[in-house]
Amino acid sequence: MADPLRPAEAERAARTPLGLNIGVGAVAVVAAALVAAAVPAPHEVWRWEAVAAAVAVAAAVTVDRAAMAAVVPLAWLVTDGFLENRLGQLTWHGSTDLSLMLLLLAAAGLGLGIGRVGQVRRGRRRRGR
């Protein structure tokens, strides 16, 4: 029996180039960082969550693991350079930055999962199930 999930994945990959999916994620991350910059600095976790939400939405919209492999490090760099520090200065804050990276990875995973469920449901509706 053929896997019913693979054709939908191949169809999606054929429709949207990787570069466009990375661009969607990058725009979402930068827009979220601009919004998060308005949150006072002592509320750092809320700033992170705005960027993580943008990563999750971009992942759900694109459903592209390869694009998220590029967007998550970009999100970490933007968050570290402009929300934790100022003027794009990158520094390592130990467990704080590790927590941020785990949050971004979890957001990407959640978004990919939600997007994949949406693809499967749309595929079943098209087939009349």
Image (cartoon, rainbow, N blue to C red):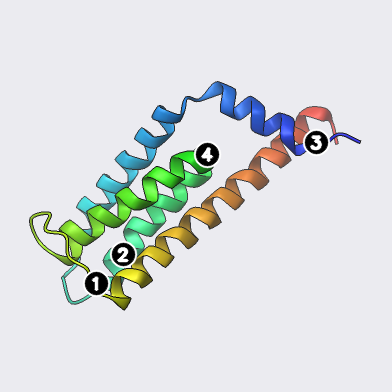
Answer yes or no: do the residues labelled 1 and 2 have beta carbons within 8 Å?
Answer: yes
Q: In this figure, which residue is indicated by the disc labeled 3?
A: 4
User: In the image, which disc is placed on residue 128?
Assistant: none
> Marks 4 and 1: which is nearer the front?
4
Is residue 58 at all visible to an observer of this figure? no
Which amino acid type is shown beneath numbered disc 1? Glu
In depth, the one of 50 and 14 nearer the eye is 14
Q: Quadrant of residue 128?
A: top right
**Residue that mark 2 sits on:** 48
Q: Quadrant of the N terminus?
A: top right
Q: CA distance from mark 3 to mark 4?
A: 18 Å
**What residue sits 19% from the left and 62% below the top?**
83
Q: Amino acid at mark 2?
A: Trp
- What secondary structure is marked by label 4? loop
Estimate how packed mark 2 is, as few (under 14), some (14 to 19) or many (20 or more) residues with alpha carbons within 10 Å: many
Which badge, 1 or 3, is on the more N-terminal residue?
3
Left or right of residue 118: residue 23: left
Q: Give the Cα distance between marks 2 and 4.
A: 22 Å
Task: Give the camera-side residue of 28 and 94.
Answer: 94
Task: Quickly name the residue at label 4.
Answer: 64
Task: Look at 43% across and 66% down and name the residue there.
Answer: 102
Which of the two labelled residues, at mark 3 and mark 2, occupies the earlier sequence position? 3
The quarter of the picture where residue 27 lies is top left
Give the amino acid type for the residue marked by disc 3 in the picture. Answer: Pro
SS of the residue under disc 3: loop
The amino acid beneath tag 4 is Asp
Mark found first going from the N terminus, 4 or 1? 1
Cα distance between the residues tagged 1 and 2: 6 Å
